[in-house]
Image: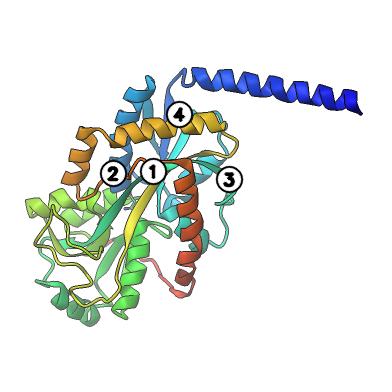
Amino acid sequence: MTFHKTLLGLAACAILAVSGAWAQSYPERQITMVVPFAAGGPTDTVARLIADGMSADLGQQIVVENVSGAGGTLGAGKVASAEPDGYTLLLHHIGMATSATLHSKLPYDTLTAFDYVGLVTDVPMTIVARKDFPPGDFSSLVSYLRANAATVTMANATVGGASHLCGLLFMSAIETQLKTIPYDGTGPAMIDLLAGKVDFMCDQTTNTTQHIKDGTIKAYAVTTPARLAVLPDLPTAIESGLAGFDVSVWHGIYTPKGTPAAVNERLSAALQRALASPEVIARFAELGTEPSSAADATPAALKARLEAEIPRWKTLQGLALPQGSAK
Ligand code: ASP
């Protein structure tokens, strides 16, 4: 018995020593960061900014791979089943939590399939429309949507997308069911909005700010309680009459369950340094957001956020959302 215990103890020490040494040499090759939405969209924009900063810190390139579909669950599923060796990361947003409620079956168990690196940013959303959409302000938007509910189209990134979540909350707040058009991400949805093929959507500022400033789309409201420094004339949904309408899109980086803790810590340190860089702070500010603090860019903070957000969005279960097809 004692002999066996000693042998087991020696084996455990050997494994720890090998994984510790391995973690010290990490990373030795290119890393893939999966974004579960289409290229060119708001999550992709955040990922590419952060991947550049983290690559410089890690001394290895982080390459972004877009694995879109099913509201982000395809990309998340890909990472859940990847080798837990630190070479496959997932950059996902609030959809990690809402998908757990809105999809009756997922290809992974949200709370047990991943390890955590840290929070990245909390991005406000904006309610925007094609440039020639008739309503001139938020209250005319609401009346117009109520009067034209059968024909107006609202884009989203399918069930589980942040745009889908915001759309559900918005339709519920104005007590009007609209026709929604699903896309693999709001990057492609924005292309259709700019082309006038879809009427409006709710999307992260990391996709909408520049177009709002350029005047190529119309903006009606921001979904955070406070106005944004970058778009000071844009009212909040709350001040426009939607009491309590408060949605922002937190983003985090995950690894497959079983990734060595030292690797997650190394990635977290790289994330913290990338988020603190003046270039990232300035670019995030231009896009209407700001980097998470060093304390939030940690495995423990992201784990706590996910665990708190899954029950928070259980309320979505009662809200139905039939999807249509583009004009
Ligand atoms: N904004 C999208 C969403 O609705 C995701 C994306 O395309 O980045 O979740």
Q: Secondary structure at mark 4?
A: helix
Residue type (three-letter) at the residue carrying disc 2 = Pro
Q: CA distance from mark 3 to mark 1?
A: 23 Å
Q: Which residue is mark 2?
A: 291
Q: Residue furthest right?
A: 1
Q: Label 1: few (<14), some or many (≥20) within 10 Å?
A: few
Q: CA distance from mark 3 to mark 2?
A: 26 Å
Q: Which residue is mark 3?
A: 113
- For the residues carrying marks 3 and 1, which lies nearer the camera in this image? 1
Choose the circle earlier in sequence order: 3 or 1: 3
Q: Which residue is mark 4?
A: 266
Residue type (three-letter) at the residue carrying disc 3 = Ala
Q: CA distance from mark 4 to mark 3?
A: 20 Å
Residue type (three-letter) at the residue carrying disc 1 = Ala
Q: In the image, residue 221 lies at what x, y percent?
A: 18, 66
Q: Secondary structure at mark 3?
A: loop
Q: Which residue is mark 1?
A: 295
- For the residues carrying marks 4 and 1, which lies nearer the camera in this image? 1
Choose the circle earlier in sequence order: 4 or 1: 4
